[in-house]
Image: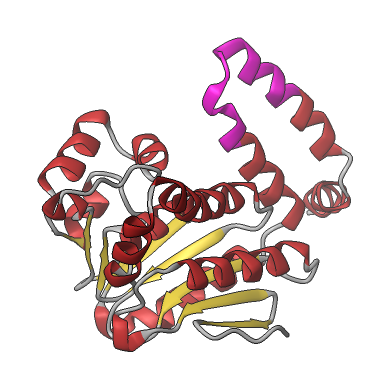
Amino acid sequence: MPEYEKIIYTVDQNIARITLNRPDKRNALDNEIVLEFKDALRSASENNDVRVVLVTGAGKDFCSGADLASLQRISAAGVEESIASARVMAELFVEMRRSPRPIIAAVRGRALAGGCGLATACDIILAAESAQFGYTEVNIGFIPAMVMAILRRSVSEKHAFELITRGEVISAGAAVEIGMINRVFPDDQFDETVEQYVSQLSAKSASAVSLSKSLLYHMDGMTFETAIEAGVQLNAITRMTEDCKRGVERFLKK
């Protein structure tokens, strides 16, 4: 198992766990932690035993966003350095979409700015009742530029506009109401309930989940007819998988 400085990566019972591990800085994101996250994600994607990737934050918060001291140093270096730094995060978002494994963010505490973006880039977001979310970049004259591509696909246009231009911090309850996150669990039951949820998902057919993720996200830029045709192709491919053959056989035996 690879060792990292700013994240913790483990694999146990078909679940890969990536923990942002800078609790003293509220798990703030710099290039190093993003690169480590990307490397761990690639390891999980290439491990046939892994069914689900679970992302958490060490300490009280999920992630406070970009490491502003690091951001300031890079900005002072010029446009080329800033573009290179932004591309590191952009490539992670693409990698998360391309990963064949479902990626779940389990959010305790605050997920703000880039931390909110990282959670949004996950396929599923589970939150503790007291968790908070916010695209707060506008408050320092910045914007959540790259993650807009994901946020815009997660909530309505009007909700997305309000979130990124007002920079408000919202509760987990408000986030689930607008479709920004998936589930909210009581604080005192959060860890146990997350484990149950992840375990249930990891028990599903790996091939069916992977094909579903791939098709769902590839439909973003398709016309209706093209999306239907893509569904035809994946429908036929799925029938040929061992998971599907065994599943149909078990059902018929009932």
Q: Quadrant of residue 232?
A: top right
**In the rendered structure, which segment of residues is drawn in magenta?**
216-232
- Residue depicted at 86% across the width and 46% down the height: 241
Considering the image in quadrants, where does the N terminus appear?
bottom right
Residue at the top extreme, as displayed: 225
- Across and down, in percent, residue 234 comes to 76, 31
Residue 74 falls left or right of residue 90: left
Height in image: 164 above or below 221?
below
Height in image: 117 above or below 27?
above
Q: Nearer the viewer, residue 235 or 78?
A: 78
Residue at the front extreme, as displayed: 77
- Residue depicted at 86% across the width and 53% down the height: 246
- Across and down, in percent, residue 43 comes to 72, 69
Q: Nearer the viewer, residue 180 or 238?
A: 180
Considering the image in quadrants, where does the C terminus appear?
bottom right
Question: Is 173 in the magenta?
Answer: no
- Across and down, in percent, residue 35 comes to 56, 67
- Across and down, in percent, residue 231 comes to 69, 25
Q: Nearer the viewer, residue 204 or 3?
A: 3
Q: Quadrant of residue 73?
A: bottom left
Height in image: 49 above or below 204?
below
Query: Is residue 59 something that shows in the picture?
Result: no
